[in-house]
Image: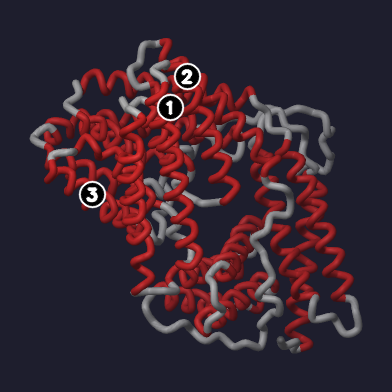
């Protein structure tokens, strides 16, 4: 890293990456949960419609069933609330689309409505940090409903179907809690222990950021878990052990940390770690952001609205029969910055192009009858969720034929025309969506870094002042955890801003100094706590 600080007003254009964009990662440790959940949520309604000969209603039931994809990393108390809001948000988006479709036949007006709804969905999902699959599924349903022939009298019944299947998806999402009520908390704690062990073995800066983020995520999970039970207290002590390992990696035992992590991933009782290092203030709220959320989301929302609208209009101009495909493609691109948006665009295009080839191979089987069509859709539902965690393009290979087969529920479609329109809308949506991302600059990304820097410096000074008191004040431990939160937020802000185009140069040296000083203060606090034997 250069020791010279770049001029603050120097605009920079980042190089768009190609290497590594399609590289496969490790599968999620719970990849099977959303994959199985969506099959269980989708199968009964679709099979019921099949028996009744009303597969034309499948779009409305799938709207509710797809809510089962969400909140699998959240403790069950938090999951219940999150899934309820997802169901309501899904039904609201569907309702907006159906009402608009019943009131106007203007394709331009419908695309405009779809773009605005997509922007709202993107902003809400980012603000609430709902997690994968984010706004994309919501936007797919609401946009498709815009081009579904509808009358106002039919809307309540169709929304009732979506709400009923949404309630079923809620039950599916909550059902595992009957058998393993602390599963999400155990997994989050195991990730923190594994990350701390990796850092203890090789204390590199990148490993430090990953480990601190994992510990932060574990605390947030535990804090949202509801009642502070004996199991939660035992998990808190294990997370504290991970914190201690980060502060004093030379004194940590990576093998012991990994052994605890393995026990947590199984069905054995929660390991009982010694509590001599327990930090105070486990009830401190870590989830609150260090800066206002909505101002940071405004540029992303504008990008989404503009990109989706222009993609839909371009698709209409080219004579496409389903402009919402281009709209959804554009909506799926938008990530934290332009560089990540570019990577997602490449993944989307590659996945969709391969996906239409899979559709071409599978469609003769799907045309054997309605039952074959339903079973093919279920298989692609499972495959999409099983593969998408490894890389977005791999999951898109299953998402694309599934989306094409869903159009068959309302009646037989000519495969060649479907494939042609899907390829065209994919290319149009990706190109126009990316151009919109470049055109709408996000100067707020730099503001977030400045605010996070100030928060880190304030938290570090406060912690250092408390640590210097004779003897060190016990509340220094509370302050240290707030400092850890600020450091994680700073690193996230820097990574987001570093991939943004037309961004003023970041204060890299100040960031490095703040991170180094903050880590030293955290380590000193933990070591002092261990030396003095402070107990809650």
Which residue is at 65% across, 42% downward?
A: 496
Which residue is at 33% across, 32% downward?
A: 153
Seen from the viewer's position, the closer of residues 196 and 328 is 328
Q: Quadrant of residue 173?
A: bottom left
Q: Quadrant of residue 159?
A: top left
Looking at the picture, does residue 527 appear above or below residue 520? below
What residue sits right under mark 3 in the picture? 45
Which residue is at 28% across, 29% downward?
A: 356
Q: Is residue 200 visible?
A: yes
Which residue is at 37% across, 26% downward?
A: 102
What residue sits right under mark 1 in the picture? 100
In this rendering, position of residue 109 left or right of residue 37: right
Secondary structure beneath label 2: helix
x and y percentages locating residue 430 in the rendered image: 47, 25
x and y percentages locating residue 120 in the rendered image: 55, 37
Q: How is the image coloured?
A: secondary structure
């Amino acid at each position: 890293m250069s020791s010279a600080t770049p001029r603050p007003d120097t605009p920079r254009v980042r190089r768009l990456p190609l290497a590594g964009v399609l590289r496969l990662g490790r599968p999620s440790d719970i990849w099977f949960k959303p994959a199985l959940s969506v099959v269980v949520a989708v199968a009964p309604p679709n099979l019921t419609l099949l028996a009744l000969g009303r597969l034309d209603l499948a779009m409305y039931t799938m709207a509710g069933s797809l809510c089962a994809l969400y909140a699998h990393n959240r403790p069950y108390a938090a999951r219940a609330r999150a899934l309820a809001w997802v169901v309501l948000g899904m039904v609201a988006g569907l309702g907006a689309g159906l009402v608009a479709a019943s009131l106007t036949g203007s394709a331009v007006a419908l695309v405009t409505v779809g773009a605005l709804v997509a922007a709202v969905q993107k902003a809400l999902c980012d603000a609430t940090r709902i997690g994968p699959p984010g706004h994309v599924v919501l936007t797919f349903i609401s946009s498709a409903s815009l081009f579904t022939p509808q009358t106002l009298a039919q809307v309540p019944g169709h929304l009732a179907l979506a709400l009923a299947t949404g309630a079923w998806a809620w039950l599916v999402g909550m059902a595992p809690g009957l058998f393993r009520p602390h599963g999400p908390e155990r997994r989050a704690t195991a990730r923190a222990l594994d990350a701390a062990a990796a850092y203890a073995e090789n204390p590199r800066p990148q490993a430090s950021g990953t480990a601190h983020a994992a510990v932060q995520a574990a605390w947030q999970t535990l804090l949202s878990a509801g009642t502070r039970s004996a199991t939660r207290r035992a998990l808190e002590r294990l997370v504290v052990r991970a914190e201690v390992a980060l502060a004093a990696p030379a004194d940590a035992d990576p093998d012991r940390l990994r052994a605890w992590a393995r026990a947590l991933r199984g069905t054995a009782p929660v390991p009982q770690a010694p509590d001599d290092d327990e930090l105070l203030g486990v009830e401190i709220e870590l989830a609150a952001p260090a800066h206002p959320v909505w101002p940071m989301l405004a540029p992303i929302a504008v990008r989404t609205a503009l990109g989706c609208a222009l993609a839909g209009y371009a698709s209409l101009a080219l004579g496409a029969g389903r402009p919402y495909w281009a709209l959804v493609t554009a909506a799926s691109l938008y990530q934290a910055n332009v560089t990540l948006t570019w990577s997602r665009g490449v993944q989307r295009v590659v996945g969709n192009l391969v996906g239409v080839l899979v559709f071409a191979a599978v469609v003769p089987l799907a045309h054997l009858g309605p039952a074959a069509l339903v079973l093919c859709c279920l298989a692609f539902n499972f495959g999409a969720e099983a593969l998408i965690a490894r890389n977005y393009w791999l999951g898109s290979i299953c998402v694309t034929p599934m989306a094409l087969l869903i159009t068959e529920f309302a009646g037989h479609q000519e495969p060649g025309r479907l494939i042609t329109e899907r390829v065209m809308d994919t290319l149009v949506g990706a190109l126009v969506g990316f151009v919109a991302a470049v055109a709408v600059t996000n100067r707020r990304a730099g503001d977030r870094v400045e605010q996070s820097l100030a928060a880190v410096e304030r938290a570090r000074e406060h912690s250092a002042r408390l640590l210097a008191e004779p003897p060190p004040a016990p509340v220094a431990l509370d302050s240290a955890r707030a400092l850890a939160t600020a450091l994680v937020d700073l690193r996230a802000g820097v990574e987001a801003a570093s991939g943004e185009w037309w961004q003023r140069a970041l204060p890299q040296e100040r960031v490095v100094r703040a991170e180094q000083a903050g880590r030293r203060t955290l380590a000193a606090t933990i070591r002092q706590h261990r030396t003095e034997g402070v107990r809650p």
